[in-house]
Image: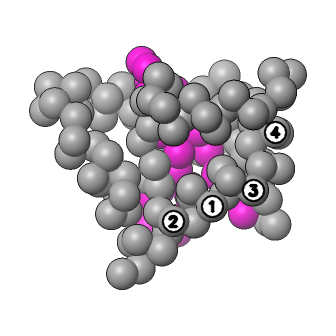
């Protein structure tokens, strides 16, 4: 069975949104296992570090960062593109290749690791 699991941080980020917006985001976030295997750059950004692969999916004004796990996917963060945190993070990135720059940015991975640690608690 293919499961979509939110860690504690991403669940808190989603629950802070109005219910109608949550439902809209989830309805647009349709991910099939075979799509993840293809890693279609038109649908998903891919960020890699130390052999770990993280995907980014844009839906409306939000970015959903997730990873493929044996059970399905784990969503680590749900960030609005116009938040102060997102602005500070992205303002330090050069424009040419967002995903490759994210992969090399330590602060991005700290943000993701914080989500992983919250799920284990």
Q: What stretch is highlighted in magenta?
A: 52-74
CB under 8 Å between callouts 2 and 3?
Answer: no
Residue 7 disc label: none
- Residue 20 in picture, x, y percent from top left: 14, 25
The vertical placement of 116 against 36, above or below, is below
- Residue 86 in picture, x, y percent from top left: 54, 34
Give the left or right position of residue 88, taking residue 91 as reference.
Answer: left
Give the left or right position of residue 6, taking residue 104 as reference.
Answer: left
Query: Is 117 covered by the magenta stretch?
Result: no
In the rendered image, which residue does mark 2 sit on? 114
In the rendered image, which residue does mark 1 sit on? 110
- Give residue 9's quadrant in the image: bottom left
Please tell me which residue is depicted at 63% across the width and 61% down the height of the picture: 110
Q: Distance between the residues labelled 4 and 3?
A: 10 Å
In the rendered image, which residue does mark 4 sit on? 101
| Nearer-the-camera pick, 111 or 26 | 111
Please tell me which residue is depicted at 83% across the width and 27% down the height of the picture: 94
Dot 1 falls on a residue whose secondary structure is helix
Which comes before the other along the chain, label 4 or label 1?
A: 4
The vertical placement of 56 against 94, above or below, is below
Which comes before the other along the chain, label 2 or label 4?
A: 4
Looking at this view, name the residue that lies furthest to the left.
19
CB under 8 Å between callouts 2 and 1?
Answer: yes
Residue 106 disc label: 3
Magenta residues: mostly which secondary structure? strand
The vertical placement of 88 against 105, above or below, is above
Query: Is 70 covered by the magenta stretch?
Result: yes
Which comes before the other along the chain, label 2 or label 3?
A: 3
**Which image quarter holds the C terminus?**
bottom left
- Give residue 106's quadrant in the image: bottom right
């Amino acid at each position: 069975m293919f499961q979509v699991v939110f860690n504690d941080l991403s669940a808190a980020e989603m629950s802070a949104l109005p219910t109608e917006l949550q439902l809209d985001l989830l309805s647009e976030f349709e991910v099939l296992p075979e799509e993840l295997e293809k890693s279609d750059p038109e649908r998903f950004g891919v960020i890699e570090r130390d052999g770990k692969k993280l995907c980014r999916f844009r839906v409306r004004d939000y970015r959903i960062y997730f990873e493929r796990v044996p059970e399905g996917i784990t969503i680590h963060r749900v960030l609005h593109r116009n938040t102060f945190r997102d602005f500070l993070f992205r303002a330090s990135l050069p424009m040419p290749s967002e995903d490759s720059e994210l992969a090399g940015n330590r602060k991005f991975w700290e943000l993701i690791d914080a989500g992983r640690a919250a799920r284990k608690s």
